[in-house]
Image (tube, rainbow, N blue to C red):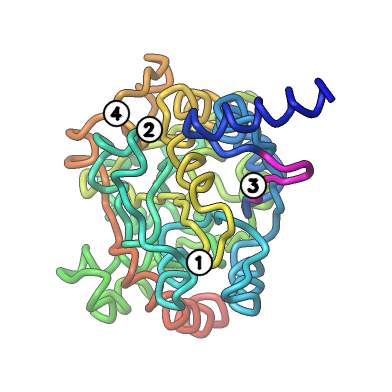
């Protein structure tokens, strides 16, 4: 009898403390990527959330578009309580009515986040990275400098460059800007893109193939993900990463609460945990990503790396941001044109 009374009292005390009691087997489910990304989320936001609430977190993983398609099929009765995805794919969730509208008054750690973190009414950025120019200085002519995106068109780079085939938005936007346009009227850069073809050695399909091509010297110049470059640098591959004068193409991964979640309060607490400076510091250390909370303490050596944005000035001067909603709307069109005119010819 005393055991039953004590359990009831403990549950009531927890409720009155502002934290609902956790039923046996109850947990918060997060949809994210697998591998090291899943590990990073588990050791940062999920760990802190569980420490604060006593609620266990389960992370289910899969590809970006596969998870979106599953979420569409489960609309109103989601498999996960929150979803981590890229900023532009998050707009596809938003447009399909899959995200709750965020109430920032329930996310104290979002009070001073960088303005660029607020992607849509339903998803908020939790870390950043860049796609930019990376090269092996031992395999590129000494007189070739990379001060502008324009330098990729240098005839001395014939047959040296690799580009991602899964998302051409980076080079399409750059070509448009160099042609006096923007991502919105990207067609003005089509001739510029075609002029780059002699310098293109290959198109890589994923992070692993990008790294293999760089390590082997098959393509010593790439438009590549900053995190991949830092990983290879740590392995001893000679890579220099540069921020062109026009800026580096920014990527932001973001989180949204799934409409229909039965754990709305916990979902808000998880986002708050993800934006906590300590969680952000772990993320920055683990993958050399940029924090979205400027209160995050970042190792000076990491903060000095190209594309790790830790200040408002860097966001203003070094970040080239493709409008996330526009990118979501245009990516299919861009990929089709790129496949037909750059890869297929």
Q: How many marks?
A: 4
Q: Nearer the viewer, residue 226 or 14?
A: 14
Task: List x then y, in percent, for residue 322.
Answer: 30, 61
- Residue 24 lies in magenta, yes or no? yes
Magenta-drawn segment: 22-29
Secondary structure at numbered mark 3: strand
The picture places residue 258, in percent across and down from the top left corner, at 52, 62
On the rendered structure, is 18 left or right of 27?
A: left
Helix, strand or loop for disc 2? loop
Q: Which residue does the image show at 29% across and 44% down from the upper left? A: 105
Q: Position of residue 57 (x, y in %)?
A: 67, 41
Q: Quadrant location of the N terminus?
A: top right
Nearer-N-terminus badge (2/3): 3
Q: Which residue is mark 1?
A: 259
Quickly name the residue at label 4. 294
Mark 2 = which residue? 308
Query: Crowding near pointer 4: few (<14 within 10 Å), some, many (20+)?
Result: some
Dot label at residue 28:
3
Q: Foreground mark, 1 or 4?
A: 1
């Amino acid at each position: 009898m005393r055991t039953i009374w004590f359990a009831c009292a403990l549950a009531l005390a927890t409720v009155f403390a502002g934290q609902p009691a956790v039923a046996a087997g109850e947990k918060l489910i997060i949809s994210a990527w697998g591998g090291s990304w899943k590990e990073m989320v588990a050791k940062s936001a999920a760990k802190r959330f569980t420490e604060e609430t006593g609620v266990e977190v389960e992370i289910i993983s899969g590809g970006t578009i596969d998870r979106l398609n599953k979420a569409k099929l489960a609309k109103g009765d989601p498999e996960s309580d929150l979803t981590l995805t890229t900023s532009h794919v998050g707009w596809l969730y938003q447009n399909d009515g899959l995200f709750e509208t965020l109430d920032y008054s329930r996310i104290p750690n979002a009070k001073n986040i960088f303005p660029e973190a607020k992607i849509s009414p339903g998803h908020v950025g939790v870390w950043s990275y860049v796609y930019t120019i990376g090269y092996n200085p031992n395999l590129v002519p000494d007189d070739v400098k990379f001060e502008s995106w324009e330098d990729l068109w240098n005839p001395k780079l014939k047959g040296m460059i690799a580009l991602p085939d899964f998302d051409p938005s980076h080079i399409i936007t750059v070509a448009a800007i160099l042609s006096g346009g923007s991502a919105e009227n990207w067609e003005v850069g089509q001739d510029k893109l075609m002029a780059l073809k002699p310098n293109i050695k290959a198109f890589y399909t994923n992070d692993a193939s990008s790294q293999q091509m760089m390590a082997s010297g098959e393509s010593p110049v790439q438009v590549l993900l900053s995190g991949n470059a830092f990983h290879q640098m740590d392995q001893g591959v000679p890579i220099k990463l540069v921020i062109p004068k026009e800026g580096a193409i920014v990527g932001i991964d973001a989180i949204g609460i799934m409409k229909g979640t039965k754990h709305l309060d916990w979902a808000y607490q998880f986002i708050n945990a993800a934006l906590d400076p300590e969680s952000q510091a772990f993320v920055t250390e683990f993958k050399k990503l940029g924090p979205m909370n400027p209160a995050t303490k970042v190792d000076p050596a990491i903060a000095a790396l190209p594309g790790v944005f830790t200040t408002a000035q860097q966001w203003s001067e070094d970040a080239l941001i493709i409008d996330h909603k526009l990118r979501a709307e245009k990516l299919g069109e861009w990929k089709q044109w790129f496949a037909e005119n750059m890869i297929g010819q």
